[in-house]
Image (spheres, rainbow, N blue to C red):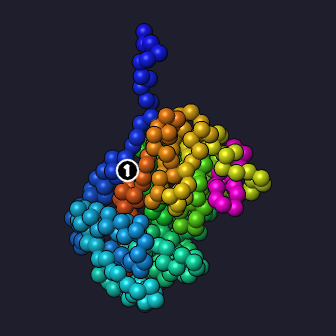
Amino acid sequence: MADSTTPVPKTCKVILAETIAKNLLAEVKESLDSMQSKGTQQPQLAAFLANDDPAAVKYAEWSKKTCEENGFKFDLRVVNKDLLEDEIMSANHDPAVDGIIVYYPIFPNNPTHDKYIQETVALSKDVEGLCHTHLQNMYYNVRFLDPRPPQKSLLPCTPLAIVKILEYLQIYNSILPYGNRLFGKTITVINRSEVNGRPLAALLANDGATVYSVDITGVQIFTRGQGIKQPRHQVLDKEGWRVEDCLPLSDVVIGGVPSDGYKVNTDLLRDGAVCINFSSFRNFDGPAVKEKASIYVPSVGKVTIAVLLRNLLRLIDNRQPNEAPKSES
C-alpha cells in the first residue's frame, strides 16, 4: 500500500494538436490522390498577409509548411492593407487559384472593415468558410449549398478544428445520430468573436450541447431548447452571470482569449474537465490545469491547418466537372 509520501500519478493526458492533425492529413492525402487520379491539377492556395501580427505570421509559416508537405501549392502574398481588396478580387478571377485565405485582423480598430474584406472573397474560393452564405448556413444548421448535385457548405476553420478535436477525444457520442452527438454535454467557450467564438458556440449547440458563450460583455447560453427539440440553436442572455458561474458546470472548457494576461481560474474547473486552448496565448496555467483536467489540449493550430486543406479540397469537389472556378462574391 502506498504511504503518504508516495507521489500520486497524474491522470491528465496532454494531447498535442500534431497528433490529431496527422489523422486528418492522412484523410486529406487520400482524397487528394483520388482527385488527382481523375485529372485534378495540384491545388493552389493564395494566402494574403496584410498585417504584422506575430500569430498571423506564424499561422502563415505553418500553412506554407503543411501545404508543401502534403502536395498543395502555397502562394503567400504580402500586401499593403489598402491594396488588399483589389488583390483579392484579382485572385477571385484567377483560374490558377483554387482557394483564398486572409490572415486577420487587418483593421483591428475597425472590425466592420475586416468583415467587408471577408465578403470580398468569392464564395467558390472561400476556404475559410467566412462568406455570408457559409456562415448563414452554419448558423441555420444547413449542411448544403445545393443538394443537387450535393455541394457541401464550408465551416470556419478554427471552430471546425475544435469540433474535430472533440470528435477525436470522443466527447461526441457516436452512438447518437448526427446533430445530437453532444446531447448532455455542457461546454464553456471563452471568446465570442465573429470569426471563432460565436461560430464555435453555434456549431456545438447545433450538435446538441448546452454552451455558455463568454466575453467581456457577459454570458450567453446557446442551446437547441429543452431536450434539443429545436432544429437550430437559440441564444439567451444569462443576466448577471460571469465565467465563474459557468466553469463548475462544464464538461469542456475552451479558451480563446487573445491576451497573455488572461488565465482560466483552475480552482473552479470541474474535476476531470476537458480543457482546450485555441488562443495564440495560453489561457490555462499548464501545471495547474494538469492537476484538475482529465484531458488538456494546449493549442489547435496544426489541426486548423489540416482543416484548411480539407476545406480547399471541398471547394474543388463542389465544382462541376470541367467547370472553371466561379468568381461570385
Residue 3 visible in rendering? yes
**Left or right: 309 as drawn, with respect to 244:** left
Image coordinates for residue 301, horizontal then vertical, percent: 40, 58
Image coordinates for residue 6, horizontal then vertical, percent: 41, 18
- Vertically, is 293 above or below 149? above
Residue 220 magenta-highlighted: yes
How many callouts does the rendering have?
1
Residue 179 visible in rendering? no
Mark 1: give few (<14), some (14-19) or many (20+) Cα within 10 Å: some
- Vertically, is 67 above or below 227? below
What amino acid is at disc 1? Answer: Ala
Image coordinates for residue 325, horizontal then vertical, percent: 37, 80
**Left or right: 5 as drawn, with respect to 206:** left
| SS at mark 1 in the image | helix
Task: State the extent of the magenta-drawn residues as a range.
Answer: 212-227
What residue is drawn where x is 64% and y is 59%?
A: 215
Residue 325 magenta-highlighted: no
Q: Residue furthest right?
A: 239
Task: Quarter of the image for the N terminus: give it.
Answer: top left
What residue is drawn where x is 55% and y is 73%?
A: 133
What residue is drawn where x is 45% and y is 44%?
A: 286
Q: Residue furthest front?
A: 5
- Front residue of 43 and 9: 9
Image coordinates for residue 212, horizontal then vertical, percent: 65, 51
| Chief secondary structure of the magenta portion | strand
**Left or right: 32 as drawn, with respect to 93:** left
What residue is drawn where x is 40% and y is 68%?
A: 54
Q: Which residue is mark 1?
A: 17
**Left or right: 271 as drawn, with respect to 43:** right
